Amino acid sequence: MPFQIFSVDTSVLPDNVLSLVDDAFYKMVEVVAGPAEAQLLEFQGVRGVYSFLNTDDVFGILALKCSTLTNIKKLICFEIDDGDVNTAIIKPGCRSNIRYLHQLLSQRHDEHMKQNKYKSSGNKQSQLTKNNDTSLNISQDLSQASSTSTTQ
């Protein structure tokens, strides 16, 4: 089955999701992606949204031969015994949960950036309107003053 990007509904995320760190972030990951996925991120020190979005491969650590990773590998991987070699294959559900989480958070970040850009351009437009109104009032005052002085 080919990989497809679906439109995701970011309303499942809390409003303050971009600012969540540590326990609050891991709890959100647990709800959205799953407890094993939350543990994987916590184990690696991925403490928040931007840390997660900037991590190239959250599963890359599982390729290391390290006894500390044994418990997390049992949650995230199928271990296949190939004689002398142990091969770990990431569970497809875990991989898709992380992909979904990444899509959700990326889209929320994009929405946030667009909203800030809109607010910023709205403030600039408002400032321009104020400046134009002030200039217009000054011009009108000057023209009225000059017409009053010529009639006198």
Image (cartoon, rainbow, N blue to C red):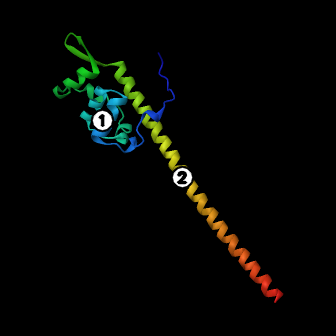
The quadrant holding residue 53 is top left
Please give the residue where the numbered disc 1 appears in the rendered image. 26
96 or 87, which is in the foreground? 96
Q: What's the residue at 63%, 67% (across, down)?
A: 131
Please give the residue where the numbered disc 2 appears in the rendered image. 119
Task: Please tell me whether mark 1 sits on a helix, a strand or a loop.
Answer: helix
Identify which amino acid the numbered label 2 is placed on: Lys
Identify which amino acid the numbered label 1 is placed on: Tyr
In the image: residue 54, left or right of residue 78? right
Label 1 Cα neighbours within 10 Å, binned few <14 / some 14-19 / many ≥20: many
Residue, far right: 151
Mark 1 vs mark 2, CA separation in Å: 30 Å
The quadrant holding residue 152 is bottom right
**Residue 15 at x, y = what percent?**
42, 41
**Residue 113 at x, y = what percent?**
49, 46
**Residue 14 at x, y = what percent?**
40, 38
Task: Please tell me whether mark 2 sits on a helix, a strand or a loop.
Answer: helix
Mark sitting earlier along the chain (1/2): 1
- Point out which mark residue 81 bears: none
Q: What's the residue at 66%, 67% (across, down)?
A: 133
Q: What's the residue at 32%, 30% (across, down)?
A: 30
